[in-house]
Image (tube, rainbow, N blue to C red):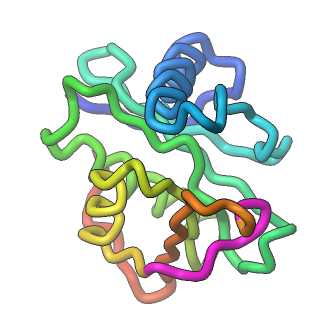
Amino acid sequence: MITIGPVPADDEELGKLRQELRADLTARYPELGADSDDHLTDSIRFLLMREDGAAIGCCALQPNGGSGLVGLELKRMYVVPTARGTGAANLLLRAAEELARELGAAQIYLETGDAQPEAIRFYERNGYTRIPIYPPYSESTRSVSYAKGLADETDGGNG
């Protein structure tokens, strides 16, 4: 059984998944060094996905006032390799979209990288449209940005 719910930023299981994500990003973008939390704000809201009690995915939403975009930014979306291709990521993304709606956001936007073609395909399949790269990523030659409006969507069910 899959469950998805909010957790504090210092949750131990969340921390482990964030370390796995950092290692994955460092391997994909060695020229950038270890990923940091420089772009996370105090108002970030984390979601943790569990299957039969084991943490298998996470993501976060936060405002990014410096971006010039209205809505919430999706951050730290990660699903463990063994759960990829099972539909778990779709459930996690739907839960993030539902939380964004509950928080009053009209859209979600995100930044990913060109060395993550599976993420690019995933977001495009889920209705995200490519947008210009926004701050603080504007100078990055590796960044790809997306947005999705939430106003007219209804929740298809979350897990």
Residue shown at 59% from the left, 17% from the top: 15
Question: Height in image: 35 above or below 113?
Answer: above
Q: Quadrant of residue 134?
A: bottom right
| Percent x, y of residue 105 | 64, 73
Q: Is residue 83 left or right of residue 78?
A: left
Residue shown at 14% from the left, 41% from the top: 85
45, 39: nearer the viewer = 39
| Percent x, y of residue 140 | 67, 60
Q: Per the image, is 105 magenta?
A: no
| Percent x, y of residue 156 | 26, 66
Q: Is residue 103 left or right of residue 120?
A: right
Q: Is residue 96 left or right of residue 32?
A: left
**Which quadrant of the figure contains the C terminus?**
top left
Residue farthest toward the left in the current orientation of the protein: 86
Residue farthest toward the bottom in the current orientation of the protein: 152
Let me know if residue 39 appears in the view: yes
Question: Height in image: 112 above or below 126?
Answer: above
Question: Height in image: 157 above or below 145?
Answer: above
65, 11: nearer the viewer = 65
Residue shown at 54% from the left, 81% from the top: 131
Let me know if residue 5 appears in the view: no
Residue shown at 37% from the left, 46% from the top: 92
Which region shows up in magenta? 130-137
Q: Quadrant of residue 8?
A: top right
Secondary structure character of the magenta stretch overall: loop
**Which quadrant of the figure contains the N terminus?**
top left
